[in-house]
Image (cartoon, rainbow, N blue to C red):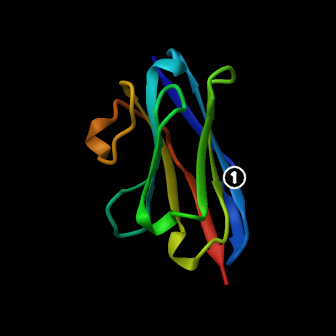
């Protein structure tokens, strides 16, 4: 059974930085396209960034371009999300997701496995 565990969430000030991690177990991490999503209270889950299984291609939502960076280390079965210059609008639960395929996708239903989420709260 594949398990995804997010970590690194917490409280961050507007303009600050935070790095999230997602560690995968029970499957072959290097065969999964991966993605980060977020969901604020009362809103739908939205795509943030995705990365291909070999790390060679990424996709980014317009709302985070230039501020967030996705990466992965297949030797450590871990994906990262570096979040810089935080804005108040990004307070949400952040989820990582894995799909059996080469590339990432921006739609939640494209993913096979999900983590439980980690809360990121931006304070002003």
Position above or below: 91 against 59:
below
Residue 42 visible at all? yes
Position above or below: 107 against 31:
below
Q: Farthest front residue?
A: 56
**Residue tagged 1:** 19
- Where disc 1 sits, the SS reads strand
| Towards the viewer: 27 or 116 | 27
Q: Residue at x 57, y 64 (%)?
A: 66
Q: On the picture, is 99 further left or further right than 81?
A: left
Position above or below: 51 against 68:
above
Q: Residue at x 60, y 64 (%)?
A: 67
Q: Position of residue 120 (x, y in %)?
A: 60, 62
| Towards the viewer: 28 or 10 | 28
| Towards the viewer: 59 or 78 | 59
Residue 36 visible at all? no
Q: On the picture, is 106 further left or further right than 12?
A: left
Task: Assess disc 1: are there few (<14), some (14-19) or many (≥20) residues with their C-alpha within 10 Å of its C-alpha.
Answer: some
């Amino acid at each position: 059974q594949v398990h995804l565990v997010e970590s690194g969430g917490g409280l961050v000030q507007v303009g600050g930085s935070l790095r999230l991690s997602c560690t995968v177990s029970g499957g072959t991490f290097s065969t999964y396209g991966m993605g980060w999503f977020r969901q604020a209270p009362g809103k739908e889950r939205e795509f943030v960034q995705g990365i291909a299984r070999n790390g060679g291609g990424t996709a980014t939502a317009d709302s985070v371009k230039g501020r967030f960076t996705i990466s992965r280390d297949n030797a450590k079965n871990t994906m990262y999300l570096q979040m810089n210059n935080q804005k108040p609008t990004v307070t949400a639960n952040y989820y990582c997701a894995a799909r059996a395929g080469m590339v990432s996708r921006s739609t939640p239903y494209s993913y096979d496995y999900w983590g439980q989420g980690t809360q990121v709260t931006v304070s002003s």
